[in-house]
Amino acid sequence: MPELPEVETVRAGLIPSMQGQVIERADVNRPDLRWPFPDNMSDRLTGATVTALRRRSKYILADLSTGETLIIHLGMSGRMTVSGDPLGQFHHDHPAPAKHDHVVFHMANGSRVTFNDARRFGAMDLAKTDAIEDHWLIKPIGPEPLGNAFNEEYLIAALSGKNTPIKTALLDQRIIAGLGNIYVCEVLHRAHINPKRKAGQLSKPRVATMVPIIRDVLSEAIAAGGSSLKDYRQADGELGYFQHGFQAYDQENQPCKTPDCGGAIARIVQSGRSTFYCPKCQR
Ligand SMILES: [Zn+2]
């Protein structure tokens, strides 16, 4: 499932094809994904210029010249692919329509952006740009981990009194935006914090150490996506996924990479999700 860094690299990868460009036509090939598409979605997109591509948590926000913003969520399996853009770096022909190509943006610059989602947990909606922060999907979301509102004081206050495990608390989108299972495991490993610890029982200094670690882990993942793949695009035109070097996630039984630890990564299940951690150095 894409997390914040993957969504950020998708956003960056869409910029050359979409930002400042006119949507010549939008094919909407089914009535819904996770939820119904907004009424007349194709008509409301056709002819609009994408004035900005932003990200809020795991939502890509495409501001339109019509005063509306297209909200895009990749869900579990949503993929964005780009073909035929005019920059000349990639000379992909437009691929034949594939199964699960649910929305296709034909840009006036000749590029084509396709949203493909086999499991259909993704979502798109249109809302007034000036009220986007009040949209029901956006409003409950906590501060951006890479933004100024996320800081030591905020996190200490947000976790205070919380009786849930720290892993569960960090996955709570109301507390912090965009963190998912992978990067929470990485953050807790780097912070040497046991994922089972009650969030409200961690000392303030230990909570504070997580703030720069969260920023670093996400920033490094975003940078890896950008540096390893030119303009974030894979050979087939898919955006946003890249090779990770995980320290904890999906490393069950592998030696712990903490210097001088000597432990091994274990897997447990918390709230139905796999947690990977080192029982020796995460306390
Ligand atoms: Zn360890």
Image (cartoon, grey):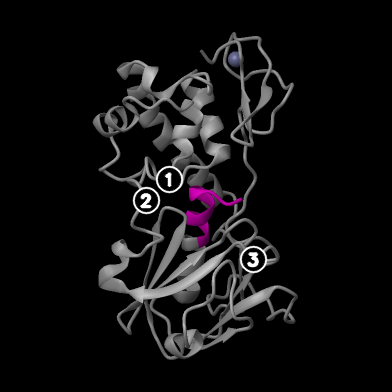
Q: Do the residues labelled 2 and 1 touch (CB within 8 Å)?
A: yes
Mark number, residue 141: 2
Q: In this view, does 28 lie above or below 221?
A: below
The x, y position of residue 1, in whole percent, is 61, 50
Q: What's the amino acid at mark 3? A: Arg
Q: What's the amino acid at mark 1? A: Gln
**Is 102 positioned to the left or the right of 55 in the image?**
right
Residue 256 is a magenta residue: no
Q: In this view, does 186 lie above or below 253?
A: below
Indicate which disc, 3 or 1, sits on the residue closer to the N terminus: 3
Q: Is mark 1 within 8 Å of ligand 1?
A: no
Name the secondary structure under disc 3.
Answer: loop
**C-alpha gap between disc 3 and disc 1:** 21 Å
Quarter of the rendered structure image containing ligand 1? top right
**C-alpha gap between disc 3 and disc 2:** 22 Å
> Which residue matches tag 3?
120
Indicate which disc, 2 or 1, sits on the residue closer to the N terminus: 2
**Is 242 positioned to the left or the right of 41 in the image?**
right
The residue lying toward the viewer, choosing from 105 and 159, is: 159
Q: What's the amino acid at mark 2? A: Ile
> Which residue matches tag 1?
173
Q: What span is in magenta? A: 1-10
The x, y position of residue 268, in whole percent, is 66, 25
The x, y position of residue 161, in whole percent, is 33, 24
Indicate which disc, 3 or 2, sits on the residue closer to the N terminus: 3
Tell me the residue at 53%/48% (across/down).
3
Q: Does the residue labelled 2 lie within 8 Å of ligand 1?
A: no
The residue lying toward the viewer, choosing from 185 and 198, is: 198
Tell me the residue at 57%/39% (across/down).
181
Quarter occupied by residue 153: top left
| Number of other residues with Cα within 10 Å of mark 3, as a class: few under 14, some 14 to 19, many 20 or more | some
